[in-house]
Structures are given as structure tokens and as C-alpha cells.
Image (tube, rainbow, N blue to C red):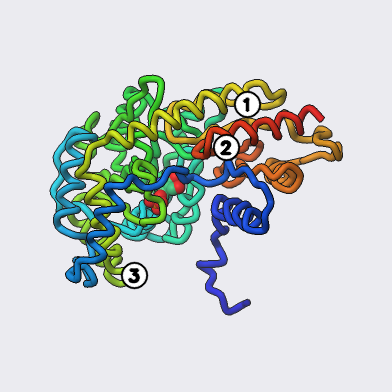
Amino acid sequence: WQTLSDRVQSVAPSVTLAVDAKAKAMKAEGVDVISFGAGEPNFPTPDRIAQAASRACLDPRNHRYTPTAGLPELKQAIADKTRRDSGFDVDPDQVVVTNGGKQAVYETLQVLLNPGDEVIIPAPYWTSYPQMVILAGGRPVEVFSGAGDGYMPTVEKLEAARTPRTKAVIINVPSNPTGAVWGADLMEAVGRWALDNHIWVLSDDIYEHLTYDGARTPYIGALVPPVRDQLIMLNGVAKTYAMTGWRVGWLIAPLPVAKAAGKLQGHMTSNVADVSQRAALAALEGPMDQVETMRSAFDRRRGAIVSALAALEGVSCPVPRGAFYAFCDVSGLLGRPLGPSGSLSETSTQLSERLLDEIHVAAVPGEAFGAPGHLRFSYALSDEDLAEGMRRLSAWIAA
Ligand code: PLP
């Protein structure tokens, strides 16, 4: 094993994917697992999108390579959608269509970072950001904000983490794992800070359409227009249209960055599967009614999970206003006897392992998000499973 590269040995595997894989393997063996693990809508991809893909499959023109950076009509649809949602114009040439939002983040960091460059990452964060920074030779700099702050940073905290090596900041609103939706004032202040200090802004907007209680996703490029020259917007169809497995995301960047990302992609994966791109085109060009149906189902489940979690002693969980995750401080459950066995969990990782083993409930430990002592519950599962999972959890804690 000494033959593996230092680079790959320097990163940790994805804990979220590992929890999901273990839950799926147990399910395949017939265990009745309730999974709050995956960041994956439980809805099928809307019919009209699947039908567009099915037609595309049967069209003999679609077996070919498309341009590496994506079908021109899809890039145009992404530019149109950006004007509609984010409120400003981008050129289709600024768009690179990627294999999911994940590849968009990866390519951006590969394109921007030199060895030793620092990237400020507000924590709790999406599990892949720091690992991707490391893979690009950079240094992740975490800035933690806890439940008491609604899991939101302040400009002062970001400024305290800034050094002459700071190259970029990653923002993700609504947030995975916390569901926090920053106010426009915070977003604007961060935009001005980044502008003044010549820091690239990576804005991961993948949960933009999933907001609740009247919260709206604030777009940094709309609030601080000059920041657009140092802004990379990261997005995809996975969460909005229940299309996780189709693998279509994109980045929108100043032209030299987009060109460089396209060059990199040309040596990595080439284009995203043509049929998937045509499905994404149908998604973006179609009406938003099915998105609204899914959003209101998530909203209902959010209400159910928040009240179930609030009733648990030792668990504290700010009300999430976006995405489909509830993120709880479970430090009150650590180091005390729990469950019928009465054994102790010292860390949230141990707690999540015990939950899966003892009551077959999967949740992702906070360690995966730079927040030990927490658990992330995805509520993108059925109402029945949600209720059953919460019932098991509450009985286990009470036992
Ligand atoms: N960004 C965030 C914050 C996410 O939560 C995810 C998926 O979990 C992604 C990006 C990547 O999504 P995908 O590659 O499935 O499009």
C-alpha cells in the first residue's frame, strides 16, 4: 500500500456516502433500516423529465460526444434560469456542465488553487469541501458557528481567519448540513468583504429552491454586482428535480475560469452523458409545479421532524429554513447511558453507529461536517418512515 499516492492518502473517504452505503447494504439483507442518512429526495424524477430522456435515448443522434462543456442549448437554459432565479445575466460561455455539482466544486478548486493557498470554509460544511481543497493542494481553514448562532458565521469571524494566503471562501446557502438560510444582509456583507480583500467566492446554490417559512435564497452576485468578476456559482439539478443519479451539475464563472475548467474536464470525463443533459434541459425549461409539490412535502416533514427532535432530552436543533436536513447538537446524549444496553457513546460517530446497529436508524455524525457532537438527519424520506424513525429514536433514548 506504500504505492498509493500521498495525495489520495491525504484525504478522508466521504462519511455521508459510507453511512448511506452501510444503510443500503443492511436494507438489501432484509433489515428494516430507516435512513435519515442520504441527501437524496425520495421522489421519482418527474415524469416529463424522464420522458424527455426516454425520447432522447431513442434518437440516434444522441449517442455521440457533446461539446465537453455541455450542449449549447443546455448552457443557454442555465443562463436563462440564472437570470430568472439569481437576477442577473451570464453568458452561456461562462457555463460548464459537469457530472453533478460535485464535479463543479472539484474543478473550480483545481482551477483556482496553488499549493498552500487557503480556503475559508464556514463550518458546519458539506463534507467534501475540505477534502477537495486538500486534493487541489490547498489548505482548508474552518470557521465554526454553532447552534446558538443558527450555524451562521459573521464577517468578523471570517476576517479573523483571513491571511495573506486566503484565496477563496466557500458559501453554501441554504446549507447542507444545517439547513441555515443566511439573510441578505449577511450575504451582502460577506460579498463586500470578499470584494475588498480580493477573495474568490464559491457559491454553492444547489438547494436554492428548497426554502421554507418565507425564507428566500440570497444571491451574492445580485447583492454585490462587482463580486461577479470573482464569483463561481455552483449548482445542479440533483436536489431541485429529484435527479441525484442523473449526474448533471454546472459551474458559472468568469470566462478564463470557465475555459480552464472546460480544459480540465476535457482530460477527465469529457462531456456529461448526452441523455442526462437532455433530461436536465427538460427540467430547466419546464414549469416549476412539481418542484413546488416536492418542496411542500419537505416542508411538512420538516415540521414533523423538528417537533419530534425538540421533544428529545439532550438534543437541541435550531429550526432549519432550507435544504432538507435537520442538524442537531447531541452533546447532551454523549457520555451518558442510553438504550436498553445502557452503554455510553463518547462521540457522535459512536452514537450514529449505535443507532444504526441497535435500532436500525441511519443518521450522519457531525464529524463529517466539521461539527463533532452533532447528528444530521435528512428528512427527504417518506412521512411514514420519518415517523417510525423518530419513534424508535425517542423510545431508545427513553429506555
Ligand atoms: N453541494 C452540496 C452542498 C451538496 O449537498 C451536494 C450533494 O449532496 C452537492 C453539492 C453535489 O450534488 P451532486 O453532485 O449530486 O449534483
Q: Nearer the viewer, mark 3 or mark 2?
A: 2
Circle number at residue 377 = 2
Whole-angstrom CA distance, mark 1 to mark 2, is 10 Å
Which residue is painted at 56% across and 25% down in the image? 306
* Viewer-nearest residue: 204 or 240: 240
Mark 3 and mark 2 lie on one chain; the one further toward the N terminus is: 3
- Horizontally, residue 215 falls left or right of residue 364, namely left
Give the image location of residue 119, x and y in percent: 42, 47
- Helix, strand or loop status at disc 3: helix
Which circle's residue, 1 or 2, is located before the other in the chain?
A: 1
Amino acid type, label 2: Phe
Disc nearest the viewer among 1 and 3: 1
Residue 11 image point, x, y percent: 54, 60
Q: Dots 1 and 2: beta carbons under 8 Å? A: yes
- Badge 3 crowding class, 10 Å Cα cut-off, few under 14, some 14 to 19, many 20 or more, is few
Residue nearest the observer in this picture, 34 or 112: 34
Up-down relation of residue 346 to residue 114 (above or below) = above
Q: Which residue is the site of mark 3?
A: 268
Residue 288 occupies quadrant: top left
Q: Amino acid at mark 1?
A: Leu
* Residue identified by numbered label 1: 309
Residue 177, horizontal then vertical, whole percent: 50, 38
Residue in the image at 33% along x and 26% along y: 216
Q: Quadrant of residue 214?
A: top left
Q: Residues within 10 Å of mark 2 (few under 14, many from 20)?
A: many
* Secondary element at tag 2: strand
